[in-house]
Image (spheres, rainbow, N blue to C red):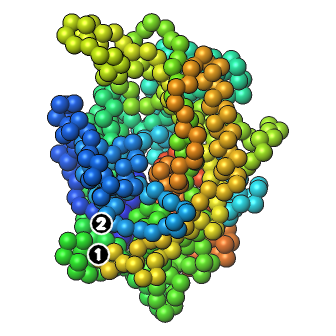
Amino acid sequence: MFDAIVIGSGMSGGIAAKELCERGLKTLVIERGRKLEHGTSYTDWMNPWDVPNAGLIPEEELARDYAVQRNCYAVNTATQQYWVKDSEHPYTTPEDKPFWWIRGYHLGGRSIMWGRQTYRMSEMDFEANARDGHGSDWPIRYADLAPWYDHIERFIGVSGSKEGLPQLPDGEFLPAMPMNDGEKAFKSAVERNYPDRKVIIGRCAHLTEAREHHTELGRNPCQYRSLCERGCSYGAYHSSLSSSLPAAEATGNLTIVTDAIAHSIITDPRTGKATGVRVIDQNTREGRTYEAKVVFLCASTIPTAQILLNSRSEANPRGLANSSDMVGRNLMDHLYGLGYAARMPGPETTFRGRRPNGLYIPRYRNLPGAGDTAGFLRGYGFQGAVDRSPWRAVANAAPGVGAELKERVRHPGEWMTYFSGFGEMLPNPENRVTLHATNVDKWGMPIAHIDCAHGENDRKMAQAILADGKAMIEAAGGQIVMARTDLVPPGLGIHEMGTACMGKDPKTSVLNKYNQAHDVPNLFVTDGAAMASGGCQNPSLTYMALSARAAHHATEFLKAGTI
């Protein structure tokens, strides 16, 4: 018997485990994937000549095993070990509604491969559902989460600059990474032509300097290699393997079980409380059960819905915590990938290193009190960078051998910019995850059926993203050379959210203000499933803050004997 079980070891599960262990709870982390070791399991040691096949996975193999994963920019031979084989982990969608579900099943989950952009949601975001009537009203506001944002930022290490923007609250930052001269010129041009917009350096979970609690965990400052999706042996960016799980292990209260697929959550029919978790060994396919006083479900948005729906019983015929019929509903992702590549004017300067971070243009549409008439609800930001073309692009730009080629690659390439929008997708209960009625995976569990599509508001927003992106690049003197103007299927933003949303009303939501299931008092959900809306900011920081806050309250409830 454990005090707590945490299902999932990624961004949310790692933080939940750390916080529970530090509060004295004997905690079991259940991970469906294989074990990885910080450092030794990574491929960041590889030089370009060490990377198999120059990073290219054969087309036949991509088509057979990675039909969905191949759409992610970070999939290559150096990172192939981190991505699931779609052929082994099927799911279904309606034929006319593709969903690109990007996944990694291993200890640490997608915290190993995440983009590390780290932003707070604002008061405006927590009020949005109540203001326009889409989705359940958040049961918390910014003030409830602000101290937990502080707590997480100090622990993981977030570099950034304070800007004083109400739509993008400042935080507890390490020194910001510097902009290069091309980016400074772009920033100046955009802000001069559009006074309502700010171009800032990205806020990212990289150590620009290591504080004492970072070095105690063996973490070191960023080396500016930009090999992050391979894992970082320096521990420069936050992941479960470099940061939260080692902190949990240091307490002596942590147990980790890998290769254990959560099948369902077991409840006591007399009390309605969760008593444990049933798992299937992914290698032997044998079943076993672990018991605990409290359960944290952090499996990530879609698997969390699967586990709840699969936890059916006589008392819960629609699945666990689902008296509202909201489990699986309101699946969201961010509008992603709409943007441009352009040649840019720039100074005759160079810069050192490969900074693993870019620029951010915070949301400026539909701000409260701004009188914006954008023609759609919510808003979007932009992410990108301005830099010199790499030596490989310079070398490939024209034929050449010998002295002529060597001379050409001694000089930096032209300035280029790459910018795309991240837009907020409205909560919609018809965008949902269900269990397939007949298809099961190789462990005998029903596979997910994902029915999710962009709506009219999303399409209107997409057109505004494209128009604004083009205008800003051209205002800075850019010449567009490539455009991505079609909405890609949801999922590719890798920010899926919303299948067990928080809310004030148990009839229209799954979780209360503590991330506690309305129907099951000792069950907490703190991954992306809990999100009642998504904002347009990268959401991982919010997941972690919710996880820390929920762990605090769960511990207090246990002490008080109320769960």
In the image, 245: left or right of 421?
left
Disc 1 residue type? Answer: Lys
Q: Amino acid at mark 2?
A: Glu
**Image location of residue 366, percent across then percent down:** 74, 42
Asked whether 59 or 462 is in front, the reply is: 59
Q: At 81% across and 41% down in the image, what residue appears?
A: 373
- Mark 2 Cα within 10 Å, few/some/many (few <14, many 20+)? few
- Tell me if 420 is positioned left or right of 235 in this view: right
Q: Is residue 521 above or below residue 16?
A: below
**Measured Cα–Cα span from mark 1 to mark 2:** 8 Å
Residue occupying the point 68% across, 62% down: 135
Q: Earlier in the sequence, mark 1 or mark 2?
A: 2
Against 475, residue 169 (above or below) is: below
* Residue at the disc numbered 1: 442
On the image, the x and y values in percent for residue 354 come to 35, 25
**Pointers 1 and 2 in contact (CB under 8 A)?**
yes
| Neighbours of disc 1 within 10 Å: few (<14), some (14-19), many (20+) | few
- Quadrant including the N terminus: bottom left
Disc 2 target residue: 88
Q: Which mark is residue 322?
A: none
